[in-house]
Amino acid sequence: MSATDAGRLRLQVRVSSKTMVAQDICALELVAALGDALPAFAAGAHIDLYLPGGWVRQYSLCNPPGETSRYLIAVLRDPASRGGSAAVHEQLHPGDLLTISTPRNLFALRPGAGPTTPPRLLLAGGIGLTPLLAMAQALHEADEPFTLHVATRSAARTPFRELLLAGRLAPHVQLHHDDGPATQRLDLDRVLTSPPTHAQLYLCGPGGFIAAATHTARRHGWSEAQIVVESFGIRPSPSTDSTDMPFELELAHSRRVVPVAPGQTAVQALAAVGVTVPVSCEQGICGTCVLPVLAGEPDHRDQYLTPQERADNRCFTPCCSRAKSTRLVVAL
């Protein structure tokens, strides 16, 4: 194990199995390379997967939380893949050794706000099922009320379909397919109408799915406090907006000051003067480029740091984040 820039540990794992769980979706079962127990995790957690070619991608853990013998992830083959999902589907095989991070959770189940256990409504779009599958298994184990709706393009594109329909989760699951009869397609107005007091709504899926579901939920009276969202996929980075204010980076070790112009990322500004910062996703989701901040106030635009880490202002992601102050002093 070795420490990462953001303080997370890296683990060596072995691919113990690789199976197709739906059209264009494969599942990887990962076990510790030396046969040790893996760190326990809670529902909603994800890991960073370090892939051939230098790619780093985040995948939600979808096996029952608390398991320490394995991690299970599912990966959709994206036709527009920049390298990550293609590497998983084409280059990884049982027996391969990989590096991963310890689990991190930015999409955790919340405790109930009322005097009794709140009903949870889990709403998944496509591969967005993965963290919600772990949640469903955790809630089932705890004997807490929940319903899981899974919307996909077709039955063939529904990951873990047999587990959802024939396993212990089946009484809590409703599947919806775009190519099915109208009665089987997801009706957001029906599903989200009249939310029970203290109910919680968990959403995960593509951006369009999330936008439609959150809009419908608000229209039916779900409050912001009741809605928990994890968006599947990379969001456009706002760091190239030409209306952004310029700022300066001071490199603490050399006292060198590097200007960052509007429409330019901090990584690009550093590269222009010969200072290389390792990057992977360049969208603020993997944490590869995280830099310690010694002074100044970052303008956090990433999806990697936790709310507490953002509030502490002790680090930032130079691939997409900027500065609210005129200067940031970083540990370079």
Image: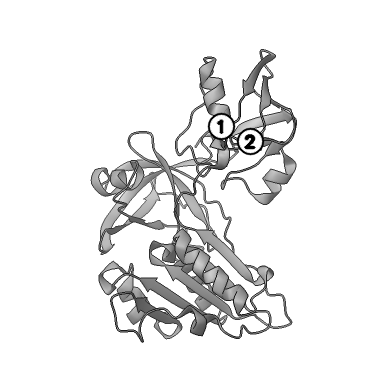
- The crowding category of the residue bearing disc 2, from other C-alpha atoms within 10 Å (few below 14, some 14 to 19, many at least 20), is some
Question: From mark 2 to mark 1, how far is it between C-alphas?
Answer: 7 Å
- Of the pair 257 and 60, the residue shown nearer to us: 257
Residue 131 visible, this orientation: no
Badge 2 marks a residue whose secondary structure is loop
Residue reaching furthest to the front:
243
Residue underneath mark 2: 244
Tell me where residue 251 sits by quadrant: top right
Q: Earlier in the sequence, mark 2 or mark 1?
A: 2
The amino acid beneath tag 1 is Gly
Residue 197 % position (x, y): 68, 83
Tell me the quadrant of the picture where the C terminus can be found.
top right
Q: Residue at x 25, y 70 (%)?
A: 156
Residue 278 % position (x, y): 49, 28
Residue underneath mark 1: 263
The amino acid beneath tag 2 is Asp
